[in-house]
Image: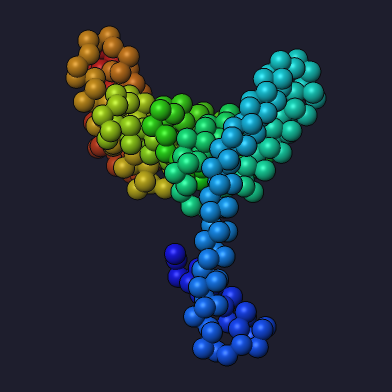
Amino acid sequence: MRLWEWLAATALGALVVWWFGWSWWALPGGVLAGVAALTVLNLGFGALQGLRPYREIRRFRRMDALLERSDAHAGARGEAERLLLQAYGLCRRVARSRPRRRVPTLVHTCAMQAEMLLRVAVRLIAFHRYDEAVFVTREAVALRHLGEDGARAEDLGRLFTAVGAGFYRAGRAADALAPEREAVSVYGEMVTSGHLAEPALADSLHSLAITLSSLDDRAGAHAAYQEAVDLYRALAAHEPPEGELRRDLARTLRNLACHLERQGRAGEAADALAEADLLDRA
């Protein structure tokens, strides 16, 4: 039992002693009675937690059905938006019932719900409902950290990238920052665990660098650009001259050159442009 449970048991035992007017020598018996009562309550709570994933999966299926109906009514924007807002209402319920700490039985469910919430966020951005999308994205981040399901990592990374790109295109770079950082984190964990996600990691770093640069975070943008360039260089070294990764490297170098030029680092900018030109001519 945790400390607060022992304190609660002691308080309950003291209350029993006071209520029945017994001698304070009976306090240990009251404490034991309190411990027994709390143990029964914990067992009941554990049983409810065991049923919780099934309830969450039903909610997940309901949200999925609403999104499918919303997509089916894409031609009737009002109806599609109404269905999407119903899905957003379910997102609010998910947020209210989110566990405060990591629960092993809910790990898979949390990851699944994070993926679903991100799908809702992408559609909310398309309907210009940015404040709702910010809320849903924040909840998806929290759920991902409560349930890091490796099987869903690639989908989560792709969806975080899509949400960040949607915010950035809408001119809300500050809101794009959190999902883009999360995409970098997801792909970084995949690379560390041995999954082949280096191109996706490099691409997410490039997107993060652009966002940081637009927010005038020069140091952060330069670090992200440099990490993306280094990763693209390592990947492009193993593909033919006409390879796609070489074009991605050239594009990243040109953006890095623009960033360096704005910082007054003309020499480094010229070097980056020269390398990009060399890649284009290859």
Q: Quadrant of the C terminus?
A: top left
From the viewer's perspective, tell me whether residue 226 is left or right of residue 203: left
From the viewer's perspective, tell me whether residue 274 is left or right of residue 225: left
**Residue 190 seen in the current view:** yes
* Residue drawn at 67 percent across, 83 percent down: 19
* Residue drawn at 32 percent across, 26 percent down: 197
Image vertical order of residue 18 relative to residue 147, above or below: below
Query: Looking at the image, how many numbered discs can be counted on the residues?
Result: 0
Q: Quadrant of residue 170?
A: top right
Q: In which quarter of the image is the N terminus?
A: bottom left
Tell me residue 173's x, y (percent): 53, 40
Q: Nearer the viewer, residue 146 or 164?
A: 146
From the viewer's perspective, tell me whether residue 258 is left or right of residue 127: left
Tell me residue 123's x, y (percent): 64, 28
Image vertical order of residue 79 relative to residue 134, above or below: above
From the viewer's perspective, tell me whether residue 188 is left or right of residue 42: left
**Residue 275 seen in the current view:** no
Tell me residue 189's x, y (percent): 33, 36
Q: Which of 118 and 144 is in front in this view?
A: 144
* Residue drawn at 75 percent across, 23 percent down: 80
Q: Which of 17 and 211 is in front in this view?
A: 17
Tell me residue 9's x, y (percent): 53, 72
Q: Which of 35 and 26 is in front in this view?
A: 26
